[in-house]
């Protein structure tokens, strides 16, 4: 290997040997403030989803405070004492362990890593330290996808990663960004090579995604339960779905085969609860037992057919409208008329149903089932029980009691709000009915069920989704988290009949935000998005893209992969069938890329005249020994030749300088390359005319210069 000329060389012509350059500082070259600011901004952008998704009471603010202090002090400030850094690290470990009970796992590990990266940024003073921070930032950015792989999250992570890659590649230029360009100068200079690198990597990544054998669920999700989209819970607490009712995240889409039911009739049941402990509801074992579907002969009700695409939530509950006449593959029907998947949902689940709408008749309500649906915890909510028993003495008919409770909710000053006062203790229903009188669907459904049970009417609570919004672009009804709802089912005249006590609240006593959500709107700063038609169209288009992403990307599992390979003519039968495919995807592309790189290097070496330069050095070493030594630069070799042959040394010095500009100066163009080649060919031609005879090859005889 021929050594290259260094950036600084001694003057040629003197006989003194060049001095050995001083070693670089141990910690690397000093850090520019603009790169420091840009790297801190990338760290904040990468940590933002983790902090929003799981805001720990003091760990996340501590990390933010560390980043803020690092920005104020800058890369030129004094490094914090080691004792302070160790104390803050110990506090981060202790706080994480106390909050989570562990320092392992996605949430605990992500929060701890966020705090430690903030500490590392606080002590960063050199390029090497900043590179460590950037690499940790990339790992922190990857953890954002562990919490969800929705289209918005992937787009955000991709944008931040491109910014990181542009910053990293922009900092590798020797000249750097021009002065006065600000912190984005290095990112702007590295954006084009970063996009080029991604353009080379994306086809191979796509091939790996399509052809590598798929598994059930992501690898980081094995053994974990609730790592996907947050949805309805199998246990209903007072206020339990309040956070979900303000979410705009899509939970499912429904396509009806024929006429769509009205919005106020689209009640999709997910969970049925019949056990009440004074503070919340849970299902009994009886309601979760398997049951056959409704027999079509003699069944009464309006038939409805639809297809559901349900987003994963780590559980097995499926949404169903009406009484199913069929059970989809991979699911089973419960006694309460709800559907359960045979496996927890790790990816989008598609199923089609034919069902009957209307009351849910039952063959007979046994004494044991009736006692279970009337059961209330002893000694709680006594005022509510006395009120219900007083109504019962006036009119014991179940339908009259239902009307009386609904009229009570309508006439009395009850308010529907998304931010009600908290209800605690085993007398929460009494507190709601006689003190706060502010709540949302779970509070009203619970109070309604307690009043009717106290009056002797079997009642149970149901949670699911109501309404939805029709999307004309794809012909589907889209259900968001804001469509989560809770209502009641009352046993009247041999059937379970749906009653929604929340609908009894007077419209004037519903908060504006809650009213907007109930009517399918979405307000931002008091502005209703529905009033802007183009925003509505943009939202519909984005939801359509999200549906395609969920179906074809997140839902691309083993079944879809095998079906796709069968369409290509490749039948998978055992692990041996995968070997040619894996070799073609994992082995052939790297070998082809390696060969292309070697050919490109060979082409560039030939274009720069590397072989001619090496031949020139060998010829000079043979004519004017000793040859160039290991570690000796071209300029140093030219200076040594100039001591004995000044004319040859000047030509060789000119050639070495032109070669250095061609190789290392980013602004050198074709003109400089042509001059270098011309000088190289002329010098080689002169040296070729000098004969190398054995008597003259000794090191003692001086050979005249060309």
Image: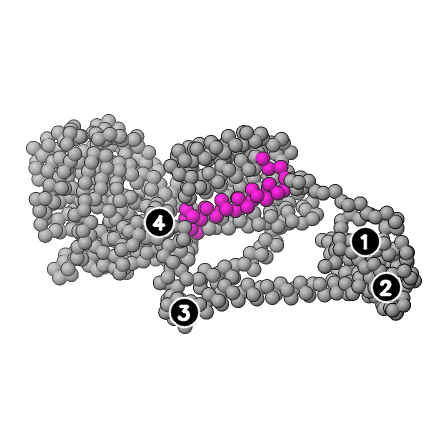
The magenta stretch is 123-151
Residue topped by disc 4: 223
Q: Please indicate whether residue 80 sits to the left or right of residue 174 in the image.
A: left
Question: Residue at left 45%, top 39%?
Answer: 111
| Mark number displayed over residue 635 | 1
In 3D space, how far apart are the residues under numbered discs 2 and 3 (Cα atoms)?
A: 63 Å
Residue at x-position 56% and y-position 60%:
200
Residue sitting at the far bottom: 569
The quadrant in which residue 409 appears is top left
Residue 343 place in picture, x, y as percent: 29, 54
Q: Which of the 4 image quadrants contains residue 671?
A: bottom right
Mark 4 and 1 residues: CB-CB less than 8 Å, in contact? Answer: no
Circle 4 SS class: loop
Residue under numbered circle 2: 623
- Where residue 140 appears, as percent x and y from the top left, is 49, 44
What residue does disc 3 label?
Answer: 577
């Amino acid at each position: 290997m021929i050594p290259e000329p260094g950036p600084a060389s001694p003057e040629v012509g003197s006989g003194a040997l060049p001095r050995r350059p001083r070693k670089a500082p141990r910690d690397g070259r000093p850090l520019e403030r603009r790169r420091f600011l840009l790297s801190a901004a990338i760290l904040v952008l990468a940590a933002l989803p983790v902090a929003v998704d799981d805001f720990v009471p003091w760990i996340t603010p501590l990390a933010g405070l560390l980043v803020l202090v690092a920005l104020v002090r800058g890369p030129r400030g004094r490094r914090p004492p080691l004792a302070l850094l160790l104390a803050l690290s110990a506090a981060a470990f202790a706080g994480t362990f106390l909050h989570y009970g562990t320092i392992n796992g996605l949430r605990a590990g992500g929060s701890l890593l966020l705090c430690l990266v903030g500490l590392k940024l606080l002590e960063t003073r050199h390029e090497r330290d900043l590179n460590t921070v950037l690499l940790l930032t990339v790992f922190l950015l990857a953890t954002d996808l562990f919490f969800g792989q929705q289209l918005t999250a992937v787009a955000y992570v991709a944008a931040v990663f491109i910014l990181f890659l542009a910053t990293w590649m922009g900092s590798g230029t020797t000249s750097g960004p021009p002065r006065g360009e600000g912190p984005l100068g290095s990112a702007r200079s590295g954006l084009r090579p970063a996009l080029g690198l991604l353009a080379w990597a994306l086809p191979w990544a796509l091939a790996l995604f399509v052809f590598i054998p798929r598994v059930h669920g992501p690898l980081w999700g094995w053994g974990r339960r609730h790592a996907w989209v947050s949805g309805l819970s199998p246990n209903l607490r007072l206020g339990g779905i309040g956070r979900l009712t303000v979410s705009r995240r899509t939970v499912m889409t429904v396509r009806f085969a024929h006429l769509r039911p009205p919005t106020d009739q689209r009640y999709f049941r997910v969970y049925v609860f019949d056990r009440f402990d004074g503070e919340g509801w849970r299902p009994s074992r009886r309601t979760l037992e398997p049951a056959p579907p409704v027999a079509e002969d003699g069944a009464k009700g309006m038939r409805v057919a639809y297809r559901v695409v349900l987003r994963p939530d780590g559980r097995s509950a499926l949404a169903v409208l009406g009484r199913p006449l069929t059970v989809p593959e991979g699911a089973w029907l419960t006694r309460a008329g709800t559907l359960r998947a045979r496996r927890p949902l790790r990816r989008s689940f598609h199923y089609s149903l034919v069902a009957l709408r209307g009351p849910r008749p039952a063959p007979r309500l046994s004494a044991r089932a009736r006692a279970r649906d009337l059961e209330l915890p002893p000694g709680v909510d006594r005022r509510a029980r006395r009120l219900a028993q007083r109504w019962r003495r006036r009119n014991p008919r179940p339908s009259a009691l239902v009307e009386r409770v609904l009229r009570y909710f309508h006439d009395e000053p009850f308010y529907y709000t998304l931010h009600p006062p908290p209800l605690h203790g085993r007398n929460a229903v009494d507190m709601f009915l006689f003190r706060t009188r502010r709540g949302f669907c779970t509070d009203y459904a619970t109070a309604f069920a307690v009043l009717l049970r106290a009056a002797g009417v079997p009642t149970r609570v149901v949670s699911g989704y109501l309404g939805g919004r029709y999307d004309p672009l794809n012909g589907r009804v889209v259900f968001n988290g804001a469509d989560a709802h809770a209502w009641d089912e009352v046993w009247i005249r041999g059937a379970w009949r749906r009653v929604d006590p929340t609908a009894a609240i007077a419209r004037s006593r519903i908060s504006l935000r809650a009213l907007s959500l109930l009517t399918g709107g979405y307000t931002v700063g008091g502005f209703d998005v529905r009033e802007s038609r183009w925003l509505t169209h943009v939202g519909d288009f984005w939801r359509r893209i999200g549906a395609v992403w969920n179906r074809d990307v997140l839902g691309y599992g083993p079944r879809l992969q095998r079906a796709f390979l069968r369409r290509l003519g490749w039948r998978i039968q055992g692990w041996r069938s995968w070997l040619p495919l894996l070799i073609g995807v994992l082995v052939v592309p790297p070998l082809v890329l390696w060969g292309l790189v070697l050919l490109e290097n060979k082409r560039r070496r030939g274009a720069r005249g590397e072989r001619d330069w090496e031949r020139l050095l060998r010829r000079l070493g043979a004519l004017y020994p000793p040859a160039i030594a290991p570690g000796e630069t071209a300029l140093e070799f030219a200076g040594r030749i100039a001591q004995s042959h000044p004319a040859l040394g000047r030509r060789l010095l000119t050639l070495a300088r032109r070669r250095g500009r061609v190789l290392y100066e980013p602004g050198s163009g074709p003109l400089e390359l042509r001059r270098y080649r011309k000088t190289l060919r002329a010098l080689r031609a002169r040296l070729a005319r000098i004969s190398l005879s054995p008597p003259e090859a000794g090191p003692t005889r001086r050979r005249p210069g060309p």
